[in-house]
């Protein structure tokens, strides 16, 4: 008997002794352990697990809150971190909708007749992603950008029957690491294409030297991991297609109100990170993998993940939604499925749908503009500080940019630690990832940073570098 | 409320809600962004002068244009056309649809969780690292494994990590070239063969025996020097405990393979039996099943993986390490397979699991397992008398957390199939069980009540099934045409997937001119 004595645990109604006895009587047992008699004796656990005793709700709350209070959040310091997980404002309506218990506590919509709400919301998400990226079909989510890229590489290899993927040298190291794990078992090799030292742009020359009849796909990120816009995407896509390879583009969707959508420059598959569209950072998870492609059937049949389709009721009287093309999936195709994914990030996709619907065409354009103004303002201010180079590359930048401290005689780490004392968290240190760039950090500025805050960063950095604090 | 005999019927809301693209009006806005300061604009200049001409977006994305009011109303209405665990019983077998405690939601939705960035200075992250480190330790204790990795975003993602670890292990031993096969029972979840295949293995299927367990003779024949491992769910998808697990483990280990535990059914054995003790080398858990976090209509979930000491060195980076004073993220693991996603895992989901484990504690978790098994056997016992349903694989052996009935006799005698039964259950305000799985049971109804539903709700489920059986024999039409009380009636799913008629986006609908 647990410490609850005569009571049931709040989450376990039938643990009340009387009810339990009644139910055991129905089954014809005297002790619940009789239901475990088929478990070999030697494996039956004789002791309690070495984890704490149960707590009341109040104690749990107090305990968890006290642990969380040991952190310092981005709400408590002026933060300029991005690099794949970005600080954006999440409108209150978005939070409200995703806490609606009918959506929150539902399973994957296996019974479409009672799941029209979720199914329609996901169909709308897919549709809005298609509008944003300029593609025709999107699935209803992958785990994150990195795993979506891994799946895209495998899909390209299946479609082309080739097994080499070309990726830029300027790629998020975590995405590259993930891609390697996804690609290797499928026999896919990954080659990196160099960048132009002056502009950061993918080197077309190096691309031409590496692309071959073995190339299944060429992948670029736009904006790149280091924040600049890849401007030669038409040439890169053209080069891929000329070699019968697919063109895969990775995106930050907040840029797509102002940057040309990948569908307009020849992308065959688009992947990306949907977290900035209405999902909080949450220490890097859950995220939202975007996955979209052209509408031709050959491609759609090779897509990974759940896709929601619009149909009608059997009597044809009314529009309705259900999961489509399930024969690609593991529960039907088993080892021949296009992927093993089933549980995805559906609720994060709903959050993004609500976010995109709130902003609309005008809002998405404004979001892109606002971010670009603010990030470029920060870049200008920082570049005026003696010893600082911002950005490192001579290219247009969207919301992130590189800041180099080589001339300042201070490492990124030292600058960061001094800034932190002033209540400012600087950008991500990328000097180990890109040793050729020297002491360089990746700063991120979004619509949440005000002019005053950006100026405070510049002023503080100036003070730090001048040795004033 | 209306009644059919003595069983309550329910009507689901139906708002006939248009697709969001059909709502709103040109120029309407649902959200205003902070204004860009004039001085900023002056310093930067027009953004169109920064973006080169060829990279500018010329026409705005064709997104809907609505006020906040309309957006809120649209999605609230959609939510009302959806069934969740808070609506009622959700007995999907192998899905463990249990109650999602509200305190966990409020903790995970706090600023203290939402506003943490994964690349913050470790000195500003000591609290969250402590939570994750402790959670790893608890999950290792619960599963009897040596080390747990929290990175996978879902159960299948955990399986992919698991099969990638099997790959890494054999590669490390120089045996990957010959060890090309992963064995799965014919009762396995579809993710098992799919995950094995994703990690580059061939799949060998072994049949179940007359007790619904792995056929030992067939397993002996299936193993060879090509065997890389076996993926097993225990209790299996019939809800039956694989009593020969000791021998199974010996057969696989003797052949040089690894034993993988599919944690879909872990709920049944919390605090009662540990996969690690049974010889499993790799174990995945479904946080969104066993540890009470909501499924969100398909995710986010979380699928941590526990491994034996021998395999720990292959786990993805970073690992959280603690020196007695301070927590830090360790990337220096030369044998690590790398990463299977960005950052560290679905942390907001994991935080809910941390709170859940604390709410239950060691005794409470054992109670979870016991009551989930009690509930499943109670439902099984009550269903046994219902005409048209049978319990294959015998009723001598107790079920664990779920029971699988066959509606084969019902189908044969009345034409009412498992699918029809499932659809009719919806009319009673209950969710259907998993149907047509496992594949080894004809017309399968796979029922997992979980521990969080009260006896009265279980009784209502049993009575509804009894009523449906009566209907099937007396008036099958009502079942064959079900559901009647849901937002929409039965769907044309063929149309949804047919190349000529499929509509996968609004854009495609406009192109095709109608659904």
Image: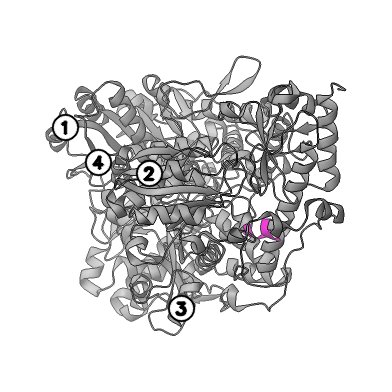
Q: Which residue is mark 4?
A: B184
Q: CA distance from mark 1 to mark 4?
A: 11 Å
Q: Chain of mark 3?
A: B
Q: Secondary structure at mark 1?
A: loop
Residue A141, can we see it? no
Q: Please give left or right for residue A456 compared with residue B263 in the image.
A: right
Q: Secondary structure at mark 3?
A: helix
Front residue of B142 and A242: A242
Magenta stretch containing residue A94, yes or no?
A: yes
Toward the top, the furthest residue is: B324
Q: Please give left or right for residue B320 compared with residue A23 in the image.
A: right
Q: CA distance from mark 2 to mark 4?
A: 32 Å
Q: Residue at x 35, y 75 (%)?
A: B495
In the rendered image, residue A137, in percent from the top left (x then y), is placed at 45, 64
Q: CA distance from mark 2 to mark 3?
A: 33 Å
By secondary structure, the bulk of the magenta-drawn segment is best described as helix
Q: Which residue is mark 3?
A: B511
| Res. A5 image quadrant | top right
Q: Residue at x 21, y 30 (%)?
A: B179
């Amino acid at each position: 008997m647990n410490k609850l004595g005569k009571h049931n645990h709040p989450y376990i109604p039938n643990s009340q002794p009387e009810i339990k006895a009644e139910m055991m009587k129905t089954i014809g047992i005297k002790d619940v352990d009789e239901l475990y008699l088929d478990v070999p004796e030697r494996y039956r656990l004789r002791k309690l697990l070495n984890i704490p005793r149960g707590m009341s709700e109040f104690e749990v709350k107090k305990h968890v809150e006290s642990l969380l209070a040991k952190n310092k959040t981005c709400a408590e310091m002026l933060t300029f971190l991005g690099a794949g997980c970005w600080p954006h404002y999440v409108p209150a309506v978005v939070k409200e909708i995703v806490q609606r218990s009918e959506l929150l506590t539902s399973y994957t919509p296996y019974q479409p007749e009672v799941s029209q709400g979720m199914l329609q919301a996901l169909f709308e998400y897919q549709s809005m992603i298609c509008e944003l990226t300029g593609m025709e079909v999107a699935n209803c989510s992958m785990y994150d950008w990195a795993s979506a890229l891994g799946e895209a590489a495998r899909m390209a290899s299946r479609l082309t029957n080739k097994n080499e993927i070309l990726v830029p040298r300027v790629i998020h190291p975590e995405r590259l690491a993930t891609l390697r794990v996804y690609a290797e078992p499928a026999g896919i090799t990954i080659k990196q294409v160099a960048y132009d030292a002056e502009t950061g742009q993918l080197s077309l020359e190096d691309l031409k030297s590496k692309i071959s009849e073995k190339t299944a796909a060429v992948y670029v990120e736009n904006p790149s991991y280091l924040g600049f816009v890849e401007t030669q995407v038409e040439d890169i896509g053209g080069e891929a297609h000329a070699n019968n390879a697919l063109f895969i583009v990775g995106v930050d969707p907040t840029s797509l109100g102002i940057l040309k959508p990948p569908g307009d420059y020849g992308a065959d598959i688009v992947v990306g990170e949907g977290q900035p569209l209405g999902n909080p950072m949450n220490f890097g998870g859950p995220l939202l993998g975007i996955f979209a492609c052209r509408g031709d059937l050959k491609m759609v049949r090779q897509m990974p993940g759940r896709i929601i389709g619009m149909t009608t009721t059997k009597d044809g009287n009314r529009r309705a939604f259900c999961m489509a093309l399930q024969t690609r999936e593991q529960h039907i195709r088993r080892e021949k499925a296009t992927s093993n994914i089933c549980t995805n990030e559906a609720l994060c996709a709903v959050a993004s749908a609500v976010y995109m619907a709130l902003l609309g065409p005008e809002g998405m354009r404004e979001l892109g503009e606002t971010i670009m103004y603010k990030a470029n303002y920060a870049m200008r201010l920082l570049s005026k500080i003696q010893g600082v180079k911002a950005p490192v590359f001579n290219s247009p930048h969207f919301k992130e940019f590189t800041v180099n401290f080589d001339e300042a005689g201070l490492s990124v780490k030292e600058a960061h630690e001094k800034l932190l004392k002033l209540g400012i968290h600087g950008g991500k240190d990328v000097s180990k990832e890109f040793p050729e760039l020297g002491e360089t950090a990746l700063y991120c500025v979004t619509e949440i940073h005000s002019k005053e805050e950006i100026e405070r960063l510049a002023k503080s950095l100036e003070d730090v570098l001048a040795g004033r604090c | 409320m209306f009644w059919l005999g003595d069983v309550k019927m329910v009507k689901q809301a139906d708002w006939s809600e248009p697709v969001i693209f059909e709502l709103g009006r040109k120029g309407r806005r649902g959200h205003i962004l902070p204004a860009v300061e004039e001085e900023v604009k002056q310093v930067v200049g027009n953004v169109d002068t920064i973006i080169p001409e060829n990279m500018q977006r010329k026409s705005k994305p064709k997104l809907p244009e609505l006020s906040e009011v309309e957006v809120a109303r649209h999605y609230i209405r959609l939510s009302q056309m959806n069934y969740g665990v808070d609506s009622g019983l959700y007995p999907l077998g192998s899905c463990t649809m249990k109650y999602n405690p509200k305190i966990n939601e409020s903790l995970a939705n706090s600023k203290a969780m939402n506003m943490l960035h994964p690349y913050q200075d470790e000195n500003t992250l000591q609290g969250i690292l402590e939570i994750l480190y402790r959670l790893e330790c608890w999950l290792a204790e619960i599963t009897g494994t040596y080390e747990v990795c929290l990175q996978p975003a879902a159960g299948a993602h955990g399986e992919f990590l698991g099969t990638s670890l099997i790959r890494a292990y054999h590669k490390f031993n120089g045996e990957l070239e010959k060890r090309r096969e992963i064995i799965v029972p014919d009762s396995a979840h579809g993710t098992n063969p799919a995950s094995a295949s994703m990690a580059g293995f061939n799949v060998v299927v072994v049949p179940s025996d007359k007790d619904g367990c792995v056929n030992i003779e067939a397993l002996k024949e299936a193993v060879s020097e090509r065997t890389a491992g076996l993926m097993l769910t225990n209790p299996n998808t019939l809800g039956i405990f694989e009593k020969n697990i000791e021998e199974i483990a010996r057969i696989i280990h003797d052949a040089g393979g690894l034993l993988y535990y599919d944690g879909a059914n872990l709920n049944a054995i919390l605090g009662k039996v540990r996969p690690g003790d049974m010889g499993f080398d790799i174990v995945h858990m479904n946080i969104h099943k066993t540890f009470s976090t909501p499924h969100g209509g398909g995710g986010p979930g979380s699928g941590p993986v526990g491994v034996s000491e021998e395999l720990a060195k292959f786990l993805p980076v970073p690992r959280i390490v603690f020196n007695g004073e301070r927590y830090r993220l360790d990337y220096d693991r030369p044998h690590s397979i790398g990463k299977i996603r960005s950052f560290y895992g679905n942390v907001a989901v994991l935080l809910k699991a941390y709170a859940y484990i604390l709410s239950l504690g060691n005794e409470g978790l054992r109670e979870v397992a016991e009551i989930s098994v009690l509930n499943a056997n109670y439902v099984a016992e009550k269903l046994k008398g219902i005409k048209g349903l049978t319990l294959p694989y015998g009723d001598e052996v107790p079920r664990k957390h779920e029971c699988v009935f066959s509606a084969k006799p019902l189908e044969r005698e009345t034409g009412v199939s498992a699918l029809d039964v499932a659809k009719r259950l919806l009319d009673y305000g209950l969710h259907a069980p998993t149907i047509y799985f496992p594949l080894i049971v004809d017309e399968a109804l796979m029922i997992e009540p979980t521990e969080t539903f009260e006896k009265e709700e279980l009784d209502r489920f049993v009575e509804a099934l009894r009523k449906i059986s009566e209907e099937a024999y007396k008036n099958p039409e009502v079942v064959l045409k079900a559901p009647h009380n849901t937002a929409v009636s039965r769907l044309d799913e063929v149309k949804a997937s047919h190349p000529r008629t499929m509509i996968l986006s609004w854009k495609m609908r406009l192109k095709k001119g109608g659904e």
